[in-house]
Amino acid sequence: MNTVAEPVLADAALCEMLCEFGLDVEYVRAEGNTLYRRAEDGREVAVTDFACGFGSLIFGHNNPEILARAKEILDARVPVHTQLARHSHTNDLAVALNKIIRREFGTDEDYHALFGNTGAEAVEIVIKHAEFSRRQRISESLHGIEAGIDSARSAVRDRGAVIAADAYDLARVSAGDRVPGPAGYEALVAAVRRHNEERAGRPPLFLTLEGAFHGKLVSSIQLTHNEMFRTPFKALSAQARFVPADRPDVLAKVVEDERDSLLQIVVAGREIQIVERDFPVFGAFFVEPIRGEAGIRPLTAEFAREIEKVCDALGCPLVCDEIQSGMGRSGAFFAASHIGLRGDYIVLAKSLGGGIAKTGIVLVRKSRYRHEVELIHSSTFGKDAFSSLIARKVIEMLEAGGGRAYRLAEERGARLRAALEAVRADFPDVVKDVRGRGLMLGLEFHDQSDSASAVIRAQSLNGVIGFGIAGYLLNEHGIRTFSTASAMYTLRFEPSVHVTDDEIAALEAALRGTCEVLRRQDERGFAAA
């Protein structure tokens, strides 16, 4: 009997692209750092996974301790969905995270927790919270300005206060309205209100770094630097200004170019004057302590200090996006703790779910927190019992043994980095750089766009060389990893803390084979993917 293949209705275009590079593989089982795919003869073929869910698997695939806890939760019939009720599991999770914040940042200020389903949703929560706070600041400023208008009106009417000449200039009052007494004052008031209303309606602008990746939802995509992802949706949400890392001069210029002010009428003796008050243009400054999709680039402590200075001067909240770099991957729970960068908001996801749950958390500094947001933001699957209890288990595992997992991340990361550096040392003409921290590392190849190989050259010019290399590693060496989203020549390595010497050795051998192909510019070898 003839059978008709089912149509491909899920990810058809993506699967077609993956097929080009031999990456259209379906995995049937996973444990630790190993995935298994099915060969044509039915055998399971092991693949060593160095992508590990793009940093989502700090304890590897299907960790036995996490699976056991998941079974306990399910067997106990814990209610997963109890919206609009007390949730002790979420509070326990928030308390546990606060203890780590106090230890790593040396603060005693509490952080409140808001919950979502994913990292991208958590970023959206930050955007909403920050904009709510910004609108409140604008409202408070306008209220104070209005109170000053009434006070100054009395000074003009009852005490004969005169309007300073430059007050008319600052408010851009027309020449015909610049008359003494109450009439001139009311013209000044109308101009001030018009100016302030225009500013009050201005949408927020967000600051972030070149190469940043903060998600692909409607608002978060505008904080993601890659134009391919961002540009088609530019009209849908508030915009961001991207600044290069380690360029305080550019950061200062961006801030100066975008700054704006409200006008306030004040009485100085017997004179009516106009003063400018900073208008909160910027909603927040988003920072990844290690920019993963930019090519695994750690932020320097020096530039972190510059960012803090700018945020303090603007009254702008600082957001530390630890979605990929957090949860112990850097050798500490928070990668930002290595450079002393304490965010007003801290965003966590990925490994927080232990590889089996989906969850995201926003931690908001108490001095910045707006309780009203709890009533105007909600999510059916945010703070569900299952994901929260799994997250609590993951934190227990990270903290066990006095933070043994952090020490493992540091030690295993050093071993992995040594292997990458050895490859670079032997292939300096092929490998440009090795970067990162702990178990979040990147290896950057030199540009291959002038390769003598037509295949390698075409993949480079078309921006898909990362997929070509990934396909070669998978099919020739049984190694799974990918390039970063905005740096096609940088491969990412984010295995679990249980990565073994043998697995690292296998990766080193595979990279050496790849470098040989690129050095020879061997089209046949590379085309084998």
Image: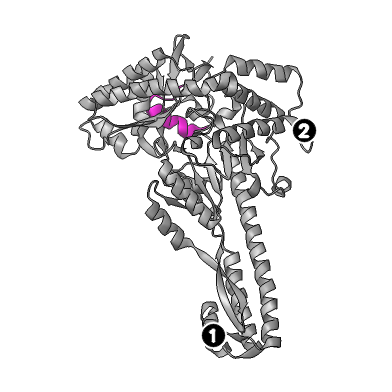
Query: Going 54% across and 14% down the picture, which residue do you hit?
Result: 1
In the picture of the structure, the residue carrying the numbered disc 1 is 174
The image shows a total of numbered marks equal to 2
Q: Which residues are magenta?
A: 11-25
Q: Secondary structure at mark 2?
A: loop
Q: Secondary structure at mark 1?
A: loop
Q: Residue 140 at x, y = what percent?
A: 67, 63
Is residue 261 shown left or right of residue 468? right
Distance from the alpha carbon under mark 1 to that under mark 2: 61 Å
Residue most extreme to the right:
85
Q: Residue 501 at x, y = what percent?
A: 40, 14
Tell whether position 20 is magenta. Answer: yes
Q: For the residue marked with disc 2, what is the amino acid?
A: Thr
In the picture of the structure, the residue carrying the numbered disc 2 is 82
Is residue 146 shown left or right of residue 428? right
Tell whether position 95 is magenta. Answer: no
Q: Nearer the viewer's eye, disc 1 or disc 2?
A: 1
Q: Nearer the viewer, residue 449 or 423?
A: 423
